[in-house]
Image (cartoon, rainbow, N blue to C red):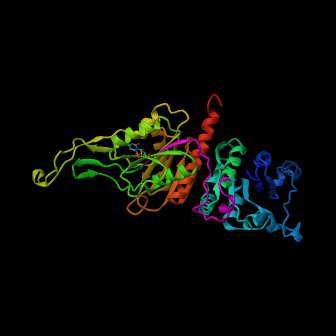
Amino acid sequence: MSRLNIVVGVTGGIAAYKAVSLVRQLVLEGHDVHVVPTESALRFVGRPTFEAISRNPVHTELYEGVAEVRHVAIGQAADLIVIAPATANTIAKLAAGLADDLLGNTVLASRAPLVVAPAMHTEMWQHPATQANVALLRERGVTIVGPAVGQLTGADSGPGRLEEPETIAAAALARVGRAPSEASASTASDAPAPRDLEGRRVVVSAGGTREPLDPVRFLGNRSSGKQGIAIAEAARARGASVTLVAANLEVGAPAGCEVRTVQTALELQHAVAEAAATADVVVMAAAVADYRPASVSEQKIKKDASGDGLVLELVRNPDILAGLGRAPHDGTVLVGFAAETEPDDDRLLELARAKRRAKGAELLVVNRVGWNEGFAADDNRVAIIGRDDAVVTEAHGSKASVAHAILDVVVSELHHAAEAAPNH
Ligand code: C5P
């Protein structure tokens, strides 16, 4: 790979010490690394450390080097900017486009792809202001790496921990690995995805099942399959080999995925079970009918034969996700969905937490649905509940950007599953 000019922005958090290792890795890969710490970052790690590790002078001051117009020169020369750790404050400044220090100026003066690795306490990460800022950055095409879930600085643990330096370095290099010069001119929607699912097998169920009553009628639901398709597409773009179990999609399946077409819950169960046997990730985005008619009429049901009313007998369908969740699935990340009509935010999250536990899924993505919300829309708003019942992240925007936000959490989960594995 040709030598890249990489700016590493470091902001003021305890995790700043991990930036030293990130810088070292990028230097060892042969890149020219320029560290731009904020004033508060230097309270955690001294300038000489960054200078020695990056092998370049380190500047923080806006009014140093004015003759060489440094406040824009560093950003203009960069092929890639990585900010790690990024505090809630810096994320807010990036979202607003503030440039009151050298790092802010560097980012604004640059067309290079931006990769941001947040690190902060769980409450700060989950604050609606931070979540809105992160969503805005994602929509602009910024790659967000992490945060991971784990032990934080104090006694607490939860989402907010800086991703490991290797993960950040890999995601950052993947971001430009494909075509740095094109990437710098790209827009949010065609920004290259990180190849962080390379070699992974991902199964996604999408759409809504249809349970036949007779040769012409069925019991169904309003799921269009758009969110599931967006996840399949995003996973493929991030390097995964993807099996899409497609239940009555309203839109075409994406190219490059193996597609298994199904109609009913039982067909979906069969297809998912087969594909899940070798999968690293199973995302159950499909809306599966909980009940099916006890019997399917061979002939079209006649209204004359049933008089003024018609009673249908229904039987329960198997809960496919709960079946996967109950079976040992070491190393496989199961992602469930909950589409709920509950209007109260807190109660919505409580329902989602209970559902995640009941299904045995590692992650549960919850969104609100209603007559005018959720299903056929092109945008979505979700919260993701993790294994410790905390809201790992919230995302809103296009279904494609929500898909990437979900996969960011999946990648972090895979990483931690590997760390927890006995032979790691
Ligand atoms: O219980 P509920 O239908 O709300 O759960 C939704 C989640 O469970 C979704 O991920 C859906 O794909 C999955 N599910 C399933 N089998 C069913 C019903 C739902 O796998 N019979």
Quarter of the figure that contains the C terminus: top right
Q: Tell me which corner region of the image, top left, top right, bottom left or bottom right, holds residue 100.
A: bottom right
Q: Is residue 68 above or below residue 231?
A: below
Which residue reaches farthest top?
422
Q: Is residue 110 magenta?
A: no
* Whether residue 409 is visible: yes
- Does residue 118 appear left or right of residue 387 in this picture? right
Q: Tell me which corner region of the image, top left, top right, bottom left or bottom right, holds residue 389.
A: top right
Q: Is residue 198 magenta?
A: yes
Q: Nearer the viewer, residue 151 or 320?
A: 320
- Does residue 63 appear left or right of residue 317 in this picture? right
* Whether residue 162 is visible: no
Q: Nearer the viewer, residue 294 or 58?
A: 58
The residue range painted magenta reads 177-205
- Does residue 271 appear left or right of residue 130 in this picture? left
- Does residue 7 appear left or right of residue 266 in this picture? right
Query: Where does residue 102 sit, x and y in percent of width and height?
Result: 80, 64
Query: Where does residue 11 sit, x and y in percent of width and height?
Result: 76, 55
Count of all numbered marks drawn on residues in the image: 0
Q: Quadrant of ligand 1?
A: top left
Q: Which residue appears at 80% of the width and 54% of the height?
A: 33
Q: Is residue 424 above or below residue 205?
A: above
Q: Nearer the viewer, residue 19 or 141?
A: 141
Q: Nearer the viewer, residue 101 or 115?
A: 115
Query: Where does residue 98 sit, x and y in percent of width and height?
Result: 72, 68
Query: Where does residue 101 sit, x and y in percent of width and height?
Result: 79, 65
Q: Which residue appears at 65% of the width and 61% of the height?
A: 183
Which residue reaches farthest front?
2
